Amino acid sequence: MKTKTIILGHVAMLAANVIWGLMSPIGKEALNSPDIAPLTLTGMRIIGAALLFWLGGMILPKSIAPKETIEKKDYLPLVFASLLITFANQICVIFGMSMTSPVDATVMCSTTPFFTLLLVWMLWNEKPGWAKILGVVLGFAGMLVFIFGGKTDTAMNVSNPLLGDIICILSQVFGAIYMVKYAFLTKKYSPFTLMKWLFTISGILMLFISGPAIATTAWEVIPTKVILEAGYVVVFGTFIAYVFLPIGQRGLSPTSIAMYNYLQPIVAAVFSVMIGVAAITMPTIIGSALIFAGVYLVNKK
């Protein structure tokens, strides 16, 4: 039974990280269409995911979608957590991705450990070891390589790589604040329950912000390919991948799960080049190597 659980855990995390790795280039392809604005795709992702999590809660087994009740004292923290990790984070990811390369966006979205560690140092005065200090230095060096090494490429719809990379980094700052400030929620509730409520709260807010844009979009003239790409971001990149997450957590250690995150930029880079929405440049290689090395050292015990 233990062996089966471990194998399922590896399969689940492999699938989830491949899905997340593909999401950036596929989402970039959808955003390349003049018919879908970043705000529209963001609204589709958050509102659509909220609906899918509620539907999944009714049909999925309790081992994946347990029936949990949120305690009253956690309502307000849950609202603030949602504003950070689903509302602000998702808006920044989509808008940043619309301006930069999908490879840059994926790598920038792997920098959360650096900002999480910095916040821990500032808030809790923990003394870092030399490995963690070196990891942060290497990580920020890699970010600078990406930010200042990116080039505008109208052929690939990379309109403003500098601003796009910065916005993607900002999304990870929001994620780090969530991880440090509201980590107790991740320990108290299952991933499925937490995601359901986080997306629901943000989804209600997005109804007012992006609802008009979604309603006035001329869906009948948008190519089927673009609709499927946007659907992938909502169904697979947001919902299905998070269904795999608790399966992985049951069979694997947190360290093993974290190591699978390295797959995302690799998958994104290979697929982006294959479909022609990105090119691998020397700054991409150098920046990725520095960030990967930094993440490893920061996570190294």
Image: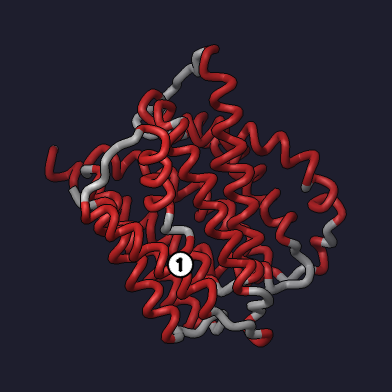
Q: Nearer the viewer, residue 241 or 143?
A: 143
Number of callouts in the render?
Answer: 1
Q: Quadrant of the N terminus?
A: top left
The residue sitting at 62% across, 37% down in the picture is: 83
Q: Quadrant of residue 30?
A: bottom right
Q: Position of residue 65 (x, y in %)?
A: 43, 31
Residue 56 visible in image: yes
Q: Position of residue 110 (x, y in %)?
A: 42, 58
Colour scheme of the rendered structure: secondary structure
Residue at the spot of label 1: 143
Q: Quadrant of residue 282?
A: bottom left
Element class at badge 1? helix
Which residue shows up at 62% across the image and 63% down it? Answer: 96
Q: Position of residue 111 (x, y in %)?
A: 42, 57
Residue 219's spot in the image, x, y percent? 80, 61
Front residue of 191/261: it is 261
**Number of other residues with Cα within 10 Å of mark 1, as a class: few under 14, some 14 to 19, many 20 or more:** many
> As drawn, is 46 to the left or to the right of 128?
right
Judge whether residue 103 can be spotted in this image.
no
> What residue type is disc 1 on?
Met
Q: Using the image as rendered, state which of residue 74 and residue 1 is in the foreground.
A: 74
Residue occupying image coordinates x 49% and y 38%: 178
Residue 269 lies, with reference to residue 77, above or below; the image says below
Q: Could you tell me which residue is drawn at 50 percent across and 52 percent down?
A: 172
Residue 53: quadrant of the picture: top right
Please, is residue 209 above or below residue 102 in the view? above
